[in-house]
Structures are given as C-alpha cells and as structure tokens.
Amino acid sequence: MISLLTLSVLLALIRGNKGQNPTVTLLPKFKQVYVGDDVTLVCNHKGGNKPTTWFINGSPQSMQSYSMLLTAVTPINNGQYKCDQGGSMGEPYNLTVLELEPHAQLSPSIGGAVMTKGEGRNLVLQVDDDLKDWACFVLRGVSGFALGVHVYEKTKRASIFAELKEAERATFWCKKKKTEHRSNAVTLKMTELMVMLDPPAVPALQGEPVALRCVVWGGPKLENAIFYKDTTEIKSSPEGTYTITNATQNDNGNYSCHATYRYSHISAQAAKREGDSDAQELKVIGGPPAAALISKSHKSLWCSCLSCPVSCTSYLWYHTLFNDPYARRRLSENDQTITIEEEGLYSCRMDCGKGFSRFSNVYNYKADHMPEFEVLLYILVGLAALIILTVLTVWMLKRRTCGGVTMQATGRGRDRETLMSVRFEQRENL
C-alpha cells in the first residue's frame, strides 16, 4: 500500500511539473507578422512573473524580463525564441517576418508616435474593399481590447480614437472579420513632459526622408529647438524640425530635443521657458520591396517591381483626389499598363497573396487645360479685335453716308446748270 501511495504521489508531481513549463506567447496574436510591426514575446509561467532567461536560436540573452519587446521587426528577427524560468525550459516559438505590407493601412490623421498623458488621436483606416467588415483592437501592456470603429459611408473611410489610458505605450491595429487580412500595427507612446520629440508613427524606411519634430504641449511660440542623437547635439532649428533626407542604418539611435518657447498667445509679456524631451528610438529598416510607376506618355502609365518575390503576380492601381489624401480608391484595372482620364494622383503596387508590395511613386495627372495666362491673353486679343472691327464698321458706314450726300448735291448742281443753259439758248432764239 505504501509503495502504491508513493507511486501515485510521484505521478501527480510529474504531471504537475509538466504543467509548470513556461510557454512563449506572441502579442498581439498575429497569425502573420509583417515587416515593421512592433510585437512582444511573453514568457508565461504558472505562478506569475519570475526571473527569465531568453534564448534566440539557442544563444542566451542578457535581459531578465518575462517579456521581450521587438520594435519594427524585419527578417533579421526571424528565428527560434525560448525562455527559461526557474530551470524550466518551455517549447520554442518560431518567429517569421514576412517582407510585405499587410492588406490595409492605419495611420494618424495628425501628429506622430508620441502623445502627452491623457491625450487621444484619430487613426484613419484605409482598405481596398468594404469597411463594414473591419474591426479594430489595441494592446496596452499585455492586455488587449476591442475598439469602436467610426465608418463614414460618404467618404468611404473609417477611423478609431486611440488612447493610451495609463499605459506607457500601446499598439493599435485593425482586422477584417472571418479572414486573416489586417492592417499594419501603429504604436503610440506616452510622455509626461511638456516638450516631446515626435517621430513618425510608421517605421522609417531606408532611402526615404524622415522628419523629427520638437513639439511643446499647449502650442506656444517656439523660439528654438536643439536636436540630439544619443546625447550628442546635431542641429539647432527655430522651426522645430530635423529632417533626414535619405535615411540609412547610420541614422538609427535615440533622439531628443531641447526647446525654448513662450506662451505669447496667452500673454504678450509671457516669460521665456525651456525644457527637454524624452529620448525616442529611431529605427530605419529596409521595408518591403517597392513598386515603380513610369509614365510612358501623358496618359499612359506602366507599373513594375523588379525586387518583388515571385508570389507577386498581379498589379493594383489607385487614384487619389488632389485635395484629400485619404480619398484613395482602388481602380478596376489589373494590367501592368493603364490609360488615365481623370485628374488626380495615381500609384500602383503588386498583389503578392499574403500581402502587398510597397506603393510606387505618385504620378500627378492634370488634364490638358489651357494655362490661365493664355486664356486671359486670348480674351484680350479677342476683345481688341472686336473693338477694331466695330470701329472700322462705324467708319465705313459714316463714309458711305457722306459719299451719298455729295453725289446727290453734285447731281442737283448739274441739273441746274443744264436748266440755265437751255434758258440761255431760248433767249438767243428770240
């Protein structure tokens, strides 16, 4: 009996220990991770947060936190992730980053990636199909929540109101119901300082311009901003913007700014104030392959993507109104070339099955209208010609009138002379 009891206890312990092994969980729980996403790997262990050792492709990492944040991921982050807590090693998680863009775009209507505490911001969702089947979510820390989506049928766009609540950072994304199609993930971060360094809310792409803004809460008059990279001063700007014209990996780093400002809109005698921002990470990535749009003629456009994978088999064309960047709509054409008629901005990209290539450069098309100065010139010339024609017509009419009177007077004179001649001849005969 004792041996049977001991065996039962040992079996129970073995079963219990099996349940104690930690598991690695990906947050947000994306079925497919796209390049540029921010994701968090969490080592879950029954009993709560414990000291953790992480392994990437078998190599131990120095961090001891139960969560590992990966920002703006690329294929470099591909690999096997495992964690050890209290001597228990969990099953590995295999991370694969797809070097394509997701099926929808989510972006702030204004501002960048940093907000002050208590502030909110609208994120605009753009999709190729019907908006009614899309839902949006937020991850604050390790807790996820559903968000209300405001759909505007007339303008064919949707938006969500993004708030951090008490979280230091939060990731927002949208997903089409009953499919795996989703938008890019947008991460917003909180600062409690008056001055903030505001980088873009989307990943910085290699070869493209990146603008870093030094912003002061409350909208005072900015007199000067000094920008720093890794605590080293790099530029002084009264406009409050530092622009990297051609971003490369060398631009990676932590950026901050020091602002000098006055609340002169409140009082003309407002005192000068100064303040520093938090440091914000800038990570430049290669990004998905980009399509290229070439104008074959004024109305004929051609799309190509030489660096796209073989899974990219069809072409997608888009038209955007001049005065509304969020009014982009997908055209019905799927050929490599199209002929355009409507004025606006045109771009293309390739459909690669699980995602898309990056959008091409934009082609600005305006119909062949006559320039305004030429129209004015033609109007003036026409008016001048009309005036000249009118003057000539009046002059000719007057001349004809005067000529007729002279001829009549001359005729009457001749008749009088004839009559006098006849009378003179009659007198001589008498």
Image: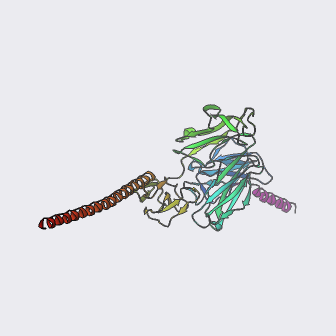
In the displayed structure image, the side of residue 51 where residue 56 appears, left or right: left
Q: Where's residue 129, x and y in %?
A: 58, 66
| Residue 291 visible (yes or no) | no
Where is residue 230 drawn, in percent x and y?
Answer: 64, 34
Question: Which residues are the magenta region?
Answer: 1-24
Q: Quadrant of the C terminus?
A: bottom left
* Residue in the image at 61% along x and 64% along y: 156
Is residue 81 shown above or below 329? above
Q: What secondary structure is the magenta-colored segment mainly? A: helix
In this rendering, the count of numbered labels is 0
As for residue 20 lying within the magenta part, the answer is yes
**Position above or below: 38 against 329:** above
Q: Nearer the viewer, residue 325 or 72?
A: 325
Q: Residue furthest right?
A: 1
Q: Pick the quarter of the image with the N terminus.
A: bottom right
Q: Is residue 130 visible?
A: yes
Task: Pinpoint residue 50: horizontal percent, then vertical percent.
Answer: 77, 47
- Residue 140: image location, x then y, percent: 73, 53
